[in-house]
Image: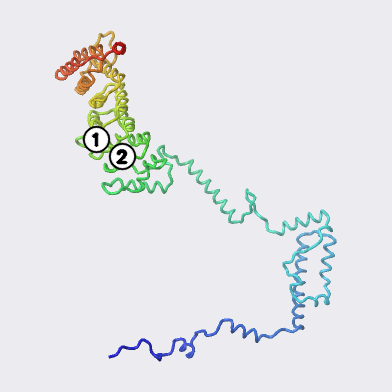
Amino acid sequence: MGKASKTQDKQRHDPLYRDLTTQGGNLRTKARGAKKQEKNEDEEYIDSAASRKILQLAKEQQEELEREEREALKENSKFNFGRAYEQEEESDDEFDQEDEENYDDISDFGGSDEEFQFDEDDLNEEDARLFEQYLQQTQPAKEFGTDGQSYNLADKIMASIREKEQQFEQTNESKVEKPVDAVLLPPKVIAAYTQVGQILSTWTHGKLPKLFKVIPSLNNWEDVLYVTNPDKWTPHVVYEATKLFVSNLSSKQAEKFVEGVLLERFRANIEDNEDHSLNYHIYRALKKSLYKPGAFFKGFLFPLVSTHCSVREATIAGSVLAKISVPTLHSSVALNYLLEMEFSPATTVFIRVLLEKKYALPYQIIDNLVYYFMRFRVVKEDAMDEDSSKAKAAPLPVVWHKAFLAFAQRYKNDITEDQRDFLLETVRQRGHKDIGPEIRRELLAGNARLPPKEKDADVDM
């Protein structure tokens, strides 16, 4: 069979618009303006007599309206507008019919909205004052604000509403006392970061919320951080937050974070655990905080030893300090701060850790170390100070003897001959049965440090 042709010579049926037009459909086949043009052609014009009658009726109605307005004006004002104005009114009442026919349009007679026109020169001062007073009474009064601009009734209502709201807020503020630790943040911010805190209370892995990551870049980051409730963070969040804040904040600001968050979580975690151990993630957070040594010492170590610090807490924190390298300057300052504090086993733990790092300490710090260990030797009763009496009353802990041994092993060549003798006397009086002989052997094996004068003499030779 052959293929059907694509085009046909004849249509199978008539187009749809033909059916609509032939069967009484509503299809429009002519332009919209054609019908109007036909109507305009059929309209007839009004002759001159009919138009004159229409104008006469309009004029009579206009005069009647003007007469009523003048009567109302006289009753309300109760004053005379002047002789010139009365003459003008009388002239308006005596229109001639011949003059009326000369007008071709009704607008020439004036509408009801026309204003009275008169010559101001014919009015005296009293009439002008009364006229202005009348206009102020008849025209609607305008309301003006404090800035000189007019405002309508709606503005007036809104102003009164705002005034009532301010009075209500002032009364509530006087009745409700704000808490001391209140956070001055917008309600939306508080609501958002409260939800973030709920997420962080169960967070263990994955990505941290973006709202939490931007906190270090905020000026009031402490207030926003407080809203997230760091006490309920998981240990995983403590580690991630320490990395985030220590790396993005300055040393002073990181110190506030370490003291306010990390130190509190460190102590709470050791106290809450049955075996008094530290969570692995918080232990890692302590390591990360040491990347800013100033923030670690001022925000963690010094507040820890200033309060009641147990030997367990000092041992765990000291193990972190022993594993991370700390600059010599920071170690020297921290060691000097610990030497000036009251004696306690926890303080001696950190002294020993810093001594075992074997830094090249300045002679001033070494002299302070010598005086620190010399304080515990026994002297005569009349010359005994408070520290020596305390040392004599109670035996020294083993950690003190270990710290003394670490000092003798590392800095035995950096002390003078007199200092060596004082330290040997301390070992003899307060030495440990096992550690004391080791300290004595180390001190005797060292070479004494030459005084400054003898060093200068050797150089001159």
Residue 57, placed above or below residue 441: below
Q: Give the structural element (helix, strand or loop) at label 1.
A: helix
Q: Give the structural element (helix, strand or loop) at label 2.
A: helix
**Point 74% across, 79% down: residue:** 54
Quadrant assignment, res 438: top left
Q: Position of residue 113 (x, y in %)?
A: 72, 67
For the residue pair 165 and 459, the one nearer the viewer reads as 459
**Point 49% across, 88% down: residue:** 21
Quadrant assignment, res 52: bottom right
Q: Which residue is mark 1?
A: 270
**Point 14% across, 19% down: residue:** 434
The quadrant in which the N terminus is found is bottom left
Residue 54, placed above or below residue 88: below
For the residue pair 218 and 277, the one nearer the viewer reads as 218
Residue 452, placed above or below residue 93: above
Q: How many marks?
A: 2
Residue 242: mark: 2
Amino acid type, callout 1: Ile
Q: Position of residue 289 (x, y in %)?
A: 30, 36
Farthest-out residue, left: 434
Q: Tell whether 211 sits left or right of 202.
A: right
Residue 367, placed above or below residue 204: above
